[in-house]
Amino acid sequence: MSLSPIERRAEKIRLLLLDVDGVLTDNRLFYGDNGIEYKAFHTRDGHGMVLLQQAGLDIGIITGRTSEVVTRRMADLKVKYVYQGVPDKLPTFEALMEECGLAPEQVAYMGDDILDLPILRRVGLAAMPANGDPTLRHHVHFVSQYPGGQGAVRELCELILKAQGRWEEIMAFYLR
Ligand SMILES: [Mg+2]
């Protein structure tokens, strides 16, 4: 099987980093009268993240905002690296690269807004949801056909798993 240029990028990925708002969510923030902030996550995105981790890859999130619901959802999904309250994401990304000992080619990142550009411009596989800021299209390798919070992350997880030859074993389990 010959790999496409995007699959060759996906083949090398060991760590998937994600923005939260607009990537794992549809960008909306629900403010409750109780002072609590709510977000909605997509369960197929979550399953993709579980499958990716079961295949031995790590996942991390870097988000400018801070909320308990993100802490809980990432704990549910056993996400290894959780960085919240990070308005300037680049120093956190660089520190994480140092900690992981990974090269940028081994990292994928999906973001949806211009504040994600510093990371998108550095990683081996830069991705955005279908409804991300159009400015990002000039700087990413992959535009999901799905909007943020509605399957974009799942599509990226599947792309990586397929490029790494792991998808068939996953489907074999579900087609048993
Ligand atoms: Mg965002």
Image (spheres, rainbow, N blue to C red):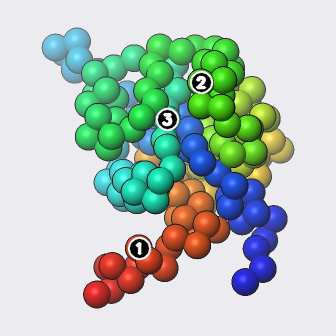
Residue type marked 3: Gly
Task: Identify the element where label 3 is drawn.
Answer: strand
Residue 151 appears in the picture as rendered? no
Mark positioned earlier in the residue sequence (1 or 3): 3
Q: Which disc is residue 99 wearing?
A: 2
Residue at the spot 51% in from the left edge and 50% down from the top edge: 57
Task: Identify the element where label 1 is drawn.
Answer: helix
Q: Is residue 21 above or below residue 84?
A: below
Near-viewer residue (133 or 155): 155
Residue 47 appears in the picture as rendered? yes
The mark lying in front, picked from 2 and 3, is: 2
Task: Identify the element where label 2 is drawn.
Answer: helix
Mark positioned earlier in the residue sequence (2 or 3): 3
Q: In this rendering, would 145 be left or right of 60?
A: right
Q: In this rendering, would 171 be left or right of 72?
A: right
* Residue to which mark 1 is pinned: 170
Circle 1 crowding by C-alpha within 10 Å: few under 14, some 14–19, many from 20: some
Q: Is residue 28 above or below residue 77?
A: above
Residue type marked 2: Glu
* Residue to which mark 3 is pinned: 60
Q: In this rendering, would 84 be left or right of 90?
A: left
Quadrant containing the C terminus is bottom left
